């Protein structure tokens, strides 16, 4: 081993050890939830808090813990890093088995090496399977009995949506359309490139999600930032940190909402009809900043990134500043906890579990930049008249062991045709199915 490599390893190890000595938050995580979260003063330091929950996976005969009155079972096991879910009209479930693409410029320097180690220990940074699998439950017992490779040779796929006879897949570098017919179990045709998306050797937030409007005339695509707070330069953020609107008739795209650091899950709120998204906010200013959030997405709105957070709280790390844009920044609707990595979002529109009707189900992938850990669960936020109307409720927990290991990490959340909740667990390599304990099939 060369002296240079050894020095780099030792430097990284020392930084991780130093960061691990950071003191824990003295504030309950509940302070960073709701429409009026607590926002203390930022705490910048030479090295960020690094508190990793090492990925372990589920021991035999173990599973997450459902809320009272619910039951959980494995809908599908033995997958490879399942991240995102989509339910087709006939009840088939598509799952994107995927991971980050090669992005060599994102792991340069000491901080880049630290983040690469963090992601690896947390269960990511494996070669991406680059496929979408189809899961079918023929006998309706809540367990997959038919699995096929639906699409393969993709490029870090994530979001999926069906419009008419076209299935749109959001690869990391492009939106691609594939021909679809009801009941098929595999697509062999080559996809049609619909829209190029920002990617490249520096591709910090690589996931791209896509959703269609109810009329099927427009697509909405999430694109995360290329950095934490524009430290790679604003020129690297062109076309990023936003939700894009793609008009199907004209094939033209435009920014729909901007200043969103890393938007992921999207869904249409059933009472108001508004588009909502969940957003991962910035890191490295303390255990108690900044809350991830969900918000309604307003056409033409700016949500602060990178210049400000949670409305107009200026982030002094960003140079140069932009007071004009900060003055326009919109405060999000609802905070989802500091560093919870809230990714999945699905409004519950079914009848099976009426206690969830109209509210939001959120998959919280879990923290790395907070001590103690936060997230690592699926929560529910009730809604009334189109707005959040109460405190979050746990739906599925138990993803962290008593020793702080990640037995699983929830990502995408959706609802199947029966009304059961499906959760993609990318560390447990499982799709969990949550239903009423009294459900009769």
Image (cartoon, helix red, strand yellow):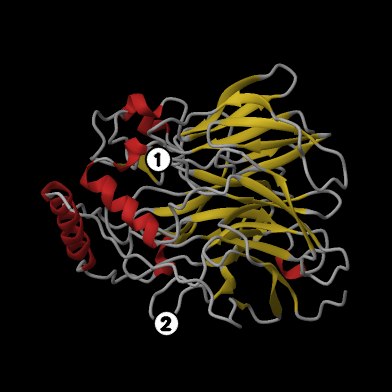
Mark 2 surroundings within 10 Å by alpha-carbon count, few (fewer than 14), some (14 through 19), many (20 or more): few
The residue pinned by badge 1 equals 204
State the residue in front, 319 or 311.
Answer: 319
Q: Is residue 55 visible?
A: yes
Residue 356 vertical position relative to residue 170 in the rendered view, above or below: below
Residue 284 visible at all: no
Q: Secondary structure at mark 1?
A: loop
Mark 1 burial class by Cα count in 10 Å: few <14, some 14-19, many 20+: some
In the picture provided, is 319 more to the left or to the right than 214? left
Q: Seen in the image, is 231 located left or right of residue 394? A: left
Quadrant in which residue 425 is drawn = bottom right
Q: In the figure, residue 234 lies in which quadrant?
A: top left
**Residue 255 image offset from top left, x and y in percent:** 54, 26
- For image coordinates 29% across by 58% down, the residue present is 40
Q: Which residue is mark 2?
A: 402
> What percent of the width, then of the height, locates residue 113?
27, 49
CA gap, disc 1 to disc 2?
Answer: 31 Å
Q: Nearer the viewer, residue 149 or 249?
A: 149
Q: Is residue 161 above or below residue 367?
A: above
**Number of marks present in the image shown:** 2
> Which of the two labelled residues, at mark 1 and mark 2, occupies the earlier sequence position?
1
Q: Give x and y (percent) for residue 177.
A: 71, 31
- Callouts 1 and 2 close, C-beta under 8 Å: no
Q: Nearer the viewer, residue 236 or 334?
A: 236
Q: Which mark is residue 427?
A: none
């Amino acid at each position: 081993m060369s002296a240079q490599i050894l020095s780099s390893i030792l430097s990284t190890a020392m930084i991780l050890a130093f960061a691990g000595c950071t003191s824990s938050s003295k504030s309950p995580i509940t302070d960073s939830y709701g429409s009026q979260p607590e926002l203390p003063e930022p705490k910048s330091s030479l090295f960020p808090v690094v508190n990793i929950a090492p990925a372990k996976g589920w021991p035999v005969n173990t599973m997450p813990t459902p809320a009272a009155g619910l039951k959980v079972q494995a809908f599908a096991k033995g997958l490879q890093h399942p991240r995102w879910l989509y339910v087709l009209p006939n009840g088939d479930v598509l799952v994107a088995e995927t991971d980050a693409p090669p992005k060599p410029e994102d792991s340069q320097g000491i901080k880049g090496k630290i983040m690469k180690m963090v992601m690896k220990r947390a269960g990511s940074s494996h070669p991406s399977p680059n496929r979408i699998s189809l899961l079918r439950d023929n006998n309706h017992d809540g367990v997959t009995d038919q699995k096929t490779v639906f699409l393969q040779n993709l490029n870090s796929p994530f979001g999926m949506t069906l419009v008419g006879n076209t299935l749109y897949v959001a690869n990391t570098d492009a939106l691609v359309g594939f021909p679809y017919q009801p009941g098929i179990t595999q697509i062999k045709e080559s996809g049609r490139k619909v829209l190029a998306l920002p990617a490249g050797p520096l591709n910090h937030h690589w996931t791209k999600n896509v959703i269609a409007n109810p009329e099927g005339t427009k697509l909405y695509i999430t694109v995360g930032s290329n950095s934490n707070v524009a430290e790679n330069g604003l020129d690297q953020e062109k076309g990023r940190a936003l939700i894009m609107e793609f008009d199907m008739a004209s094939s033209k795209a435009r920014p729909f909402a901007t200043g969103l650091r890393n938007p992921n899950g999207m869904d249409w709120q059933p009472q108001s009809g508004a588009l909502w998204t969940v957003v991962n906010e910035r890191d490295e200013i303390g255990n108690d900043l900044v809350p991830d959030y969900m918000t309604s997405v307003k056409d033409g709105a700016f949500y602060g990134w990178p210049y400000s957070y949670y409305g107009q709280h200026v982030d002094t790390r960003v140079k140069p500043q932009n007071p004009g844009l900060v003055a326009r920044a919109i405060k999000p609707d609802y905070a989802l906890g500091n560093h919870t990595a809230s990714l999945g979002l699905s409004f519950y529109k079914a009848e099976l579990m009426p206690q969830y009707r109209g509210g939001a189900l959120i998959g919280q992938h879990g923290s790395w930049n907070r001590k103690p850990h936060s997230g690592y669960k699926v929560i529910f936020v009730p809604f009334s008249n189109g707005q959040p109307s109460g405190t979050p409720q746990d739906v599925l927990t138990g993803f962290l062991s008593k020793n702080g290991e990640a037995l699983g990490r929830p990502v995408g959340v959706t609802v199947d045709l029966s009304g059961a909740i499906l959760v993609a667990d990318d560390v447990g390599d499982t799709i969990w199915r949550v239903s009423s304990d009294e459900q009769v099939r």
